[in-house]
Structures are given as C-alpha cells and as structure tokens.
Image (tube, rainbow, N blue to C red):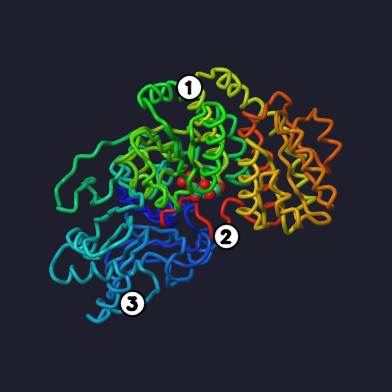
C-alpha cells in the first residue's frame, strides 16, 4: 500500500541507498517509483512501472546529495502514470513529499488551494500536502511548522516524508494510521514504512505512534507530538537480519518463503512460554471472536474448528472489513483474537480499536513492533521472519502453529504439542518432492477455473488454496466445503475441470471421497491431496499429491497447505507471472 523511505547519510550519496531501500518495499506497491534529493534545487526522478524497469529507463540512483526521500506506489487516487508518481511537489518545485495513505478531504483542500492560485499537476490526493506546506512556508514558517499546520487540516491516513530546498539538511516525517519507523545508524538516519527496508544499514528502530512527527537532520533524530513537545522514544534493537529480506539464490521470495516454512514452524514453537503466560493471564472467557482478512482470515477459520471441536468454546470468525456490524456483540468475557501478518492492515486495526475498550484482545502478528502489537492487550508473535512475497505462505503456517499452541495450552492437550513437533520434518519431506507438483502445475496451467474442496479442518485449507491460485496465477479458483458442492457448484463441473480435493486420513475421509466420486462422474479431473499410502484416494484421482501418512486430519492444515502453495507458485511461473508481485495487489493493505 505504498512504501516510503527517507535517509540522511554521512556524506555518502543518498540516491543509491534510497533505491536499495525502496526495492525492499516493492512488496507494498509496484505501480510507480520515485526519488527526490535536495541541494540548491530539488532533483526528482520518477516514472510508472516496476523499480528495475524505471531504474533502467531513468537511472534512479543518478541524483546528487547525501539525503533524500523515495516512494513505491500502489495507486489509490489517479491511475499509474509518471505525473501521478511520487514524490509530489508544490508550485515552485521547492518542496517534495512522499505519502502512504489516503487524504479523505483532498477534494475540498484542492479546491481551496486552487482558488488561492496553486497549480496542481497530478490527480493524486497526496499533492495537496506539498501545496499546503508551501502555503505555510510562504508565511514565514519553517518546514517543520508548515508540515504540522498542513497535517492539522488533513483528514485521513498518512505516513509522510517531506523535504524543502530551503532547509536542505532536514527531513520531516509524520504518521497517522499508516506505518512509519525511524532507523538510527552510525551518524546516519532513516525513515521507512517497514524495518526490512533499512536492515542493511541499522537494526536500531524507533516505532512512531499516530500523531507523532519526526525531524531528521545530520545531528540526529527528534520525535515530537503535534503540540511540538519533544517525546523520548525507546530504541528497539530488532533481531531480523539483512539476509532474511534477500532471495538467497531462490528465483522468487515466494518459493524461498515456502521453503522456510519448516523453520518458521520450529521458531514459532519456541513461543511456548509466552503462550502459557498469556493463557494464565487471560482468565475466564465464554466466547472467542477471531477478526482478520485474507489468508489471516483462513487461519482464523481453523481456529474456530479447534476452539469449538476441542474445547467447546463458541467461536466466531469475522472479516475485519465487516466487523462493525458485530462489535456490539462483544463483551468483557469475549476474547477477540486479531490475526495479521503485518499488524498494519487498516480494516483489522479499525476492528481492534472498536473493541479494545470492551473486550480482551490478543493480537497474533508477525511484524515486530507493528501497530496491532502496540494496541492489543496481549500479543503473540509468529516467528516467521520477514515475508516479502505478496502471497502469504510461511506466516500462514506460523499463525496456525500459534493457534494450535494456544488451544493446546488452554485445553491442556499436550498431545497436540507433540504432533506439532513433527510438522517441520513432515513439511521437509514434502518439499523434497516438489518436482512432482511442478509437473502437475505444467499439466493444468491452461485451466480457466479450478475448484478446491475439503471437509472440516480441510475446508479452510481449500479456501486458502483457492486464494493462493487467484492471487498469483490470475486463474479463477473457488474453495468449497466438499459437502456443499451438491447444493449448487456441482453445476460448474464439466469435462476436464480441475478439482483439488484435500483428503487427509480421518473422520471426513470417506465422505470427501464420495464427493470426489461425484466430481469424477461429471468429468472433473481430481488432484487428490492425501496420505501417500491412501490406495482408495489414489484409485479415484487423476493425480495424487502424497503426504506423510502420520499426519492426521486435525493437525493436517499446517502441512496440507504446502502442496497447494507450490501448485499455485509453479502455475504462476509457468504462465510467466511474477508471483512476488501479482497485479493490483500489495502486501500490506493500509487503506479501508
Ligand atoms: O497483514 P495481514 O495478515 O493483516 O494481511 C491480510 C491480507 O491482506 C493478506 O492475508 C492477503 O490476503 C495476502 N495477500 C494473502 O496471500
């Protein structure tokens, strides 16, 4: 959802560093990119397109100066064009701004600025910010004061960085409802939407809160509130390393992250102490409500099956964007569990804010120090490391691991913890045989529709498999509860339509096999995902993806999603799509 970076270096050229940092944020948007550096004038290079394309065309690092700001865009207001690319400037070109967020009242601000004579160049909401700063600077205020005045007029969300030709050694940043962190290196200072962007330079991070401004100059970093009062901020040393945000020899981040899943599960299992502690603190609850979006929503659905079938605790799962209709149904005996990889998803944060005064809240989050971790009452981290591919993979299995552990400690089902210990090895065995899945991907890459079916614990797996397919292959994919097929969707099964059936050994096995037969009777091609020793399944399907027979139905979602991720990944690659940067999507959705 747009990424911003700013840096002030110790006499080194800033543009190559800004380029390197902003590349790490490309997962947040890839409609356009731009860099601005100030000296006797503001120098800007920007254009629409992926960073490498634009760099090859305009030479983004070829800009003077040891400080500057940069941006990658996920378009909201105004189509992706060079003119709509950030940084945006005022009338004189003396002020440049990069912005992540949405200015809701930009039309009225633009009308008023235009009536005062300001000339706009773009269709973006962002452009009102440099013009407002210009308006105040021409009254004699400095950059910091002018940014503050401008932000006082703005409704909406923002993380911004602003520079001015008249104050060349300074960057002013601010945030409200969009993430912004500050990095303190050795005599060099950074601003960024996310920590992985600057990990090559520093791991000393300050997390800004809503309503805070930061002033970066050669002598350091000052954080203030909107009244201009200085705020002492804690510097967090984060443990993520720069190589975690590199491809390390893999073709794409997505396949690297799929292969990191055994490690992600192992690391998340080490959270046991924190989970036990939280379980002891939470006390009595009579209802659970999961709130999440996308893949995190699918992880939550598994949570519902676990809490209801193993503990008998009533559990709702609500899409964060629909939560406001249910907020009143939460009380002090409800535990609201927010699940989010980024901890910055606008819909999810809004839901958290709606309910945090009236219910107990627990956030299960991957990104250290993100907004959700600072606003929820209790926090559990998934230890997946930075996830760069837009499609969530290793964070999904880590979320599931966390949920299983939570349920195990609440219900004292230590057998579940024992089973979780086997998951990394079971995943590794599957990953060693991924060539077979690649072949299946080649066979079905021309399909225009796919169906994914499963019962019980395998139903959310089917939904998540379908989401992965849609996201990175652009093939239409639908996930269904297998028993629901006959209530409508079966009408869509025709000769050769691929149907992925998730059929682990267990209670639902035989019934799902009956559904597989129904599909076959209509000409569907079934790709079965089940035990490698399941002769019945093998005889019913076109292709079998076999997993360790020891994986039972209850624990299966963590490992059974892996072949579905691989299937989508290899179809995407076969179709020449970049799975890390699917069209129209961004990793972190900071708009509602
Ligand atoms: O950061 P979050 O987990 O809150 O993000 C939620 C969704 O935007 C996210 O899961 C999205 O659906 C992924 N691209 C799925 O692969």
Q: Residue at 64%, 38% (x, y): give it.
A: 561
Q: Residue at 74%, 38% (x, y): give it.
A: 512
In this rendering, does residue 299 appear at all? yes
Which residue is labeled 1 in the image? 409
Q: Distance between the residues labelled 2 and 3?
A: 28 Å
Image quarter hosting the N terminus? bottom left
User: Which of the numbered marks, if any, corresponds to residue 583?
Assistant: 2
Which residue is labeled 3 in the image? 120
Image quarter hosting the C terminus? bottom left
x and y, in percent, of residue 555 in the image: 62, 28
Q: Is residue 172 left or right of residue 575?
A: left
Q: Which of 515 and 186 is in front in this view?
A: 515
Crowd around label 1: few <14 · some 14–19 · many ≥20 (10 Å):
many
Crowd around label 3: few <14 · some 14–19 · many ≥20 (10 Å):
some
x and y, in percent, of residue 293 in the image: 49, 48
Which quadrant holds residue 488? bottom right
Crowd around label 2: few <14 · some 14–19 · many ≥20 (10 Å):
some
Q: Nearer the viewer, residue 113 or 57?
A: 113
Dot 1 falls on a residue whose secondary structure is helix
Q: Residue at 67%, 39% (x, y): give it.
A: 455
């Amino acid at each position: 959802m747009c990424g911003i970076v700013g840096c002030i270096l110790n006499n080194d050229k800033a543009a190559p560093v800004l380029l390197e940092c902003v590349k790490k944020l490309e997962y947040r948007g890839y409609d356009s990119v731009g860099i601005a550096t100030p000296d006797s004038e503001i120098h800007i290079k920007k254009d629409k397109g992926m960073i490498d394309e634009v760099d090859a065309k305009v030479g983004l690092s070829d800009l003077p100066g040891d400080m500057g700001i940069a941006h990658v865009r996920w378009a909201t207001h105004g189509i992706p064009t060079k003119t709509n690319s950030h940084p945006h400037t005022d009338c004189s070109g003396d002020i440049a701004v990069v912005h992540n967020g949405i200015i809701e009242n930009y039309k009225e601000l633009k009308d008023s600025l235009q009536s005062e004579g300001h000339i706009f160049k773009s269709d973006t909401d962002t452009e009102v910010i440099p013009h407002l700063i210009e308006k105040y600077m021409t009254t004699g205020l400095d950059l910091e004061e002018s940014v503050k005045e401008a932000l006082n007029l703005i409704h909406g969300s923002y993380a911004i960085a602003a520079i001015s030709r008249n104050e060349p050694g300074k960057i002013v940043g601010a945030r409200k409802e969009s993430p912004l962190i500050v990095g303190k290196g050795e005599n060099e200072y950074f601003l960024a939407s996310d920590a992985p962007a600057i990990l090559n330079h520093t791991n000393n991070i300050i997390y800004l809160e809503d309503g805070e401004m930061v002033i970066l100059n050669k002598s350091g970093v000052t954080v203030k509130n909107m009244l201009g009062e200085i705020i002492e901020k804690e510097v967090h040393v984060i443990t993520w390393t720069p190589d975690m945000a590199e491809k390390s020899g893999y073709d794409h981040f997505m396949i690297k992250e799929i292969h990191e899943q055994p490690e992600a599960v192992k690391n998340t299992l080490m959270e046991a102490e924190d989970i036990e502690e939280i379980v002891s603190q939470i006390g009595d609850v009579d209802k659970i409500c999961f709130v999440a979006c996308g893949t995190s929503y699918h992880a939550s659905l598994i949570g519902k099956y676990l809490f209801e079938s193993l503990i008998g605790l009533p559990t709702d799962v609500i899409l964060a964007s629909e939560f406001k209709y249910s907020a009143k149904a939460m009380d002090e005996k409800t535990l609201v569990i927010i699940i989010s990889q980024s901890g910055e998803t606008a819909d999810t944060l809004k839901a958290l804010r709606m309910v945090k005064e009236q219910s107990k809240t627990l956030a299960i989050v991957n990104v250290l120090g993100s907004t959700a971790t600072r606003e929820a009452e209790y926090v559990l981290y998934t230890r997946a490391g930075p996830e760069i591919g837009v499609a969530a993979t290793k964070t999904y299995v880590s979320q599931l691991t966390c949920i299983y552990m939570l349920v195990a400690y609440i219900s004292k089902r230590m057998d579940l913890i024992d089973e979780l210990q086997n998951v990394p090895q079971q995943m590794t065995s599957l990953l060693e045989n991924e060539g077979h899945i690649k072949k299946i991907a080649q066979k079905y890459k021309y399909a225009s529709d796919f169906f994914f079916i499963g019962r019980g614990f395998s139903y959310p797996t089917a939904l998540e498999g379908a989401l992965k397919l849609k996201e990175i292959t652009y093939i239409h994919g639908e996930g269904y509860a297998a028993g629901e097929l006959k209530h409508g969707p079966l009408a869509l099964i025709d000769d050769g339509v691929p149907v992925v059936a998730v059929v682990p050994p267990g209670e639902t096995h035989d019934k799902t096999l009956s559904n597989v037969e129904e599909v076959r009777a209509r000409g569907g091609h079934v790709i079965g995902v089940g035990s490698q020793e399941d002769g019945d399944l093998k005889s019913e399907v076109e292709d079998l993806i076999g997993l360790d027979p020891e994986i039972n139905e209850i624990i299966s979602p963590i490992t059974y999603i892996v072949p579905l991720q691989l299937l989508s990944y290899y179809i995407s690659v076969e179709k020449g799509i970049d799975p890390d940067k699917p069209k129209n999507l961004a990793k972190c959705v900071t708009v509602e």
